Each structure stands twice: as structure tokens, then as C-alpha cells.
Image: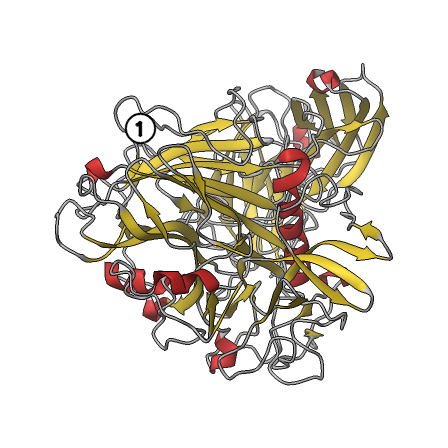
Amino acid sequence: MRNSSYRRGLLLVTAIALAILAGNAAAAELREVPTPESTDARPPLVWTLHNLGNTWSAFLNLGMYGDPWLVYPSCEWPGGADNSYLWGGDYWSACYGPVTIWGDSAAKWSSCSDYGNWELYASEGFPLEKLSPGPTALEETHYGYDDWLPSYNTDPYGMLVYEENYSWGTPGYNEFIVNNLVITHQSAHGNPGVPLDAFVCATRGDCDIADGDVTECNLDDMVYYDGHAIWSNDPAATFEYLFDDGTPASQADFFTYQQNPDATYEDEDDNIYYYYNYLGSDGIVDADVDGNGISDHYTILARVFGGDTLFTTEPSTGMILFSTGMPPSWFSVSANDTTYLVVPRNMSYMWDSDGTSSSNDDSGEYDNVPICNGFIGWRMLDFWIRKADGTIERPGDVNGIPIPLSHSWWNWSSDPGTDAEKYDFMWGANPDLSGRTSAPAYLAGWVGNPNAPEAFECTNPGPWPIVDDIPFAQGYPVFDYRFLITMPPVNLADGDSLHVIGAWVVSRGLDGLRQASDVLLDAYYRDGGWGVPQLPPSPILFYEAQDHNVHLEWGANSEVYDPFGGYRIYRATYETTNWQLVADIPGGGTYSYDDGDVTNGFPYYYVVCAYDAETGVESTKSNYKQTIQGSPVAVIPSWDASADWKNQVAVVPNPYRGSAEWEQTYFDKIAFINLPAMCDIYIYTLGGDHVITLEHRGWTGDEGTEYWDLISRNDQEIVSGLYFYRIETEDDSLIGKFAVIK
């Protein structure tokens, strides 16, 4: 979202800092977050960052996902690529009736962490904590927020949210960040004793795909839902989704399944197939491109053939998905002598489509660096209520499977501003009332309830939400869209707690997104819950650049892992992607390495990974140098200081012809080498105009290189021409020249 009419700086942050808090905590009951006791005053607002997996993202402890101010990563994928797929996401909720502090005033109410209109704030007794590792995941953040701070919300209904976020570095399990929410009704902060009847909550995603694309990345996106175009011939649950025009999902052929016809890639895996990017019939059912008779909108848990149950293998680790745990309910769909055990995917998602301003098809930004062929989504995993008396209710299930209430979308010109508008979007009452032929089967049970005025009886109830169909199908072009996935309506009495588990997922193409979200579901049920395979701990690493060398040293902390296999050293140039193996050191006992295969002037990043002796699985590639904000910091091998500097000083490259090998795209840089440790460098034009003074301070006495970005003291790029420099020390000087040709 890039709407200039939005006001920046409205958030009054009493303390914004990156939280990197480590420690241990008591083990939590799997899949259910125990809410800590509330104690004292409200904690400050604090940013925290998940960056140990392959999807990096910031969180703010008032129900905010990602950083719209672009300081921290926002569902950055791959981690370290500086390419975020989420502009901003947030938690929404809505309710109807006399539930607020205003007593008997019945209306449509909402309490949301909406950008520019935050109504939630960090809650007393629930300060932000970061655990790495935590009791559930390799990386965890815990915090709470509520809706009753008067300066933020004048219409609270007594909603406390306790949130835990989880991420892992294990290959295959490293492309999602889980949100585990416990929403408790505390009516004393709303209308005392009045339940939240037909209460709903939602996750909103304003995804700009992706900010590595510098040409209006927000204006060429598309949005859809995965998990509605399904059908089943199970005698116990026979159903089929119908689109608004009556077309059944098993016959719908509105789109052409194909790759971008104009794209070329160095890595053929980047040439993804698009399912819903090109309008037009191609004879292939949109939701069954492989023609096996099973909807692609399902997660396949297992296949039963000839009496054998066959599970899917996760390609990165060889893990057998769902073999040690699977959802308690599923649909059995038969096709071609095979029975498939399946569940709907329950995921809203977005991707970069073909921009209208481009003469070529730029879907995925194939000519951009980095490319933007990732898909981002949010998947609902589970949903239930723990009543104040300890009993469990599952009001959002259809045939034992949790199903969202609605998937809605809109563009910036339709951003809902009032409580009533937000309420309607959450209930699937989008402006043109599309996508309401099929709706969740439980919705009919809310018809006639005075606190659910938007409930309706659809003609085709089933295990799918109200889905506002893809913009393409409704005649809308690519644009700056956002999605809203809303959980089922519930009745929350005082002290009842609603549990919602879902996750942000980013991966390459829709196929990658689907696979990653299916691995996410496996993680949720594996070995009784969140049984993600452990990794060896990352070694504590230090390294520094020298002249034509980088020296690394690390600690022995990883060797407590059993079975410990050894260390692998990786190096990346320019950015923290495309890691290259530098050395494989089996066993323990070695804690240093010198990499002499480097070139002075180039930016390098290093990680040292410990690995498992049996599986070869490595610790995360996360121990490279970083700023406190989590941004990677390069080390640059440089020329040492020279005692004979007057005879050895040089400018490289000279002449500078618009670029140098060590530069990243769009960054000019030359180097003065073999300098004395302490000196000033005065640079002049041929006409004698002073361009800039560079102060070289090699405090250790060894540093003899000073880099210059070709920006003048007036903050302007210099032009082509001949330039003179004068190097001065306390007792000597030297004059030289260099040329710039752009």
C-alpha cells in the first residue's frame, strides 16, 4: 500500500526498539497457549524480529505484522534478500450488540490494529519477550494487547489478545511464521456481564509484492483464496463448490495454466507456473491442473491404494509428512482406484501479476534484481474455544474441519474506515455482495440471531468460506489489493478464551506456497504438536576483513548437540543469499579459519553452520554480522596501510568507467589504496573546485584503504571528468589524479 493520503507518524510509541531477548521458559501445552497472570502497568510498544528462518518479519506488540515504515523486514523472502512481500498486516475483530462501555448502545463495533487508526495497545502484565530457542520453536515472541486504553479506543468491548509467534530454521519448515492467538473476553472493560455474541476476528494482509521492485511494486498485484474450489464424492460428505454463475469447481475453466511467456531466468526453477494469472479457457480445470480428479485446493494428507497408506515426502529433509500426526478429521475423496485423505487449505494469498504500464508481461518481475516470484499467504490452521469452566467448543468446524467465515479483498480506494464498514467486510458483505452462492455450513445457524445481522442462508453450504472471487473474474485489473481472512463467529462469555492458530507463509510460486503451507500443517500435528525436527545450535561467530583475507573464529557451543558432525563455512558476496561452501570441517576442536580466496574491495558475508552427523542437516545461516535492526553488515577486505605510501598510493579503478566489479547495482564506489594510517584526502575538479574531503582514520594502524561513493560534499553525484586529489598527513603530502567516465 502506497497511498499518500495516509498519515504517517500517528502511532505514539513510548519505546520502539528491537527486542532480542533470549532465555528459557516453562514448556507450554502444545497447540494451546497458556495465558500468563496479568501483573502491573502497561509495557512499552516494542518491535521484535524473526530472522532465523527463510522468511523474516518484524512484529509490533499491538497486533501488527510487518513494518509499514520499511525499517525492518516485513515477510522478507528469502531472508536476507532485502525484498519484503508484506507492507503491513494486522489483527482485526468485530462484534454487534450492546457490548461496549456505552451500555445498551447496539451497533456494529470493531476493535482493530488498522494502520493509522490503531485501537489496540500493549496490555498490562504482558510485555514482549523473545526466546531463542523457546519451548515450542527455535525462535519465539510472546506479548499481549487489548482494546481498552482510552486514548486509543473509545468503544472497547473488553478483548484481551495474548499472542505467541513461532519460527524455525529447519529446511522445509523455515518459510512460515506462526501466529498463536488466545483472545479472552474481559467484560469489565466493556459492558460488564454482556457476552460477545457473534464475535469474529480476522487477519488482514496489505501485501506489496515485493518492495525490491522499485517501480510501484504495489500497483500490479493480484489476490485469491486457496481452499474453496473443492469437491468430494465421500458418501459421508458429498459436496461441490459453486461459483456465482453456477459453474461447479470440478468444471471451472476460466484461466490458462502457463508460465510467463516473456520471462527468461538463469535458474529454471524461477520460471514458475501461474494458475490464476491469465484469463481464458485452456481445456484444463483450474483447480485440477494435473487431472487426477482431486482439487489442487486440498492439502493431501495421505493416499490409500491397494490397502497401503502412502504419505508425501518433504523434499528438503526427506521427512514423511503427516506420518506422525495428522488432523483428527478429513475428507476421503476417491479417484482412479486411489482414495485421498484431504483437508481444504484455508489460505488467502497474493502475488505479483502483469503490470499495466509494462510493454512486456512482467509477472514476477523477472528482469528485476531481486526477482519477485514469491507468493505470500496466511493460512488458518485451527480454531476453538476454551470456556471459562474449562470445556472445549468447536463452533467453526464443518464435518470436523475448521473453516474460515470469509475471504474478502479490496483496493486502497475502498479501505473501510468506520466500525460498520470493517464489520461488513469481516462478515463477507463486500460492496457488490459477490461470492455468496457458497458459504460455510455453520453460517445458517446464525441466521435470525439479532447479534449477527449479516448472517444469511446460502444456496450451497459446505466446507468453504464466503469467497469474494478473484478480481480478474469480476473484471477488475491488477492493483494495490489487500486480503482479509476472517475466523468463524463465536459466542464469548466473560472469561471464555478463543484460540486461533494460523501463519504467514512465503515461497516461490503458488506451487511453492502450497507445499510450504502443507509442511506448516504437518508441523502443527507432528509428534503431538509442533514436532519440527531440531537443528544443531548456530556457533557463536566472529570475523574480520584483512588485506586479501577474512579471518573467522567461532565458539564450541554447537558441540553439545548429539550427534554433532562438524562445521561448514559459507560465504556470500553482495547480499546474504546464494551462499557458497568455503570449507567443510568434520568433527570438533577447530574454531578458526582464514579465507584467502577473496578480492579486496568486495563486500562479503560469512556464516558457520554446525551439522548433524547422521542427517547432514545444518544450523541456520544466521550468524553473519548484523545491525541491531537485523540488517546484514558486510566485511570488505582492503589494502593495508603502507609505510612507503608516497610511492604506492593509487586509485582503483582508474579510470572509473561507470562501474567497478565490487559494486552492487546502482552503487558507485572507488578506493584510495595503500594510504598512510592517518590522513585527509582533498578532492578537486580540474578547474580547482573543492569536491569533498575524506578523513581516513585507520585507528589500528593497519588500515590503508578509503572508499568513496562519488557523492560530493553537496550531496550530488559527480560528473565525468578529470579530478585531482591531495593526500595530507601531519608532516607530508602527495598530489595525484584520477578520471571518471560515466
Q: Quadrant of residue 671?
A: top right
> Is 79 situated above or below 561?
below
Q: Position of residue 288 (x, y in %)?
A: 70, 71
Q: Is residue 281 left or right of residue 8?
A: right
Do we see residue 508 in this rendering?
no
Q: Is residue 346 left or right of residue 643?
A: left
Q: Position of residue 372 (x, y in %)?
A: 60, 60
Q: Position of residue 202 (x, y in %)?
A: 40, 53
Label 1 CA crowd tier, 10 Å (few <14, some 14–19, many 20+): many
**Quadrant (top left/top right/bottom left/bottom right) for the N terminus:** bottom left
Q: Give the amino acid type for the residue marked by disc 1 in the picture.
A: Pro
Callout 1 secondary element: loop
**Quadrant (top left/top right/bottom left/bottom right) for the C terminus:** bottom right
Residue at position x 45%, y 47% in the image: 66
Residues 440 and 201: in front is: 440
Residue at position x 73%, y 59% in the image: 340
Residue at position x 44%, y 62% in the image: 406
> Is 564 situated above or below 94?
above
Do we see residue 583 in this rendering?
yes
List the residue tagged with mark 1: 43
Q: Is residue 223 left or right of residue 299?
A: left
Residues 271 and 289: in front is: 289
Residues 144 and 99: in front is: 99
Q: Position of residue 645 (x, y in %)?
A: 66, 29
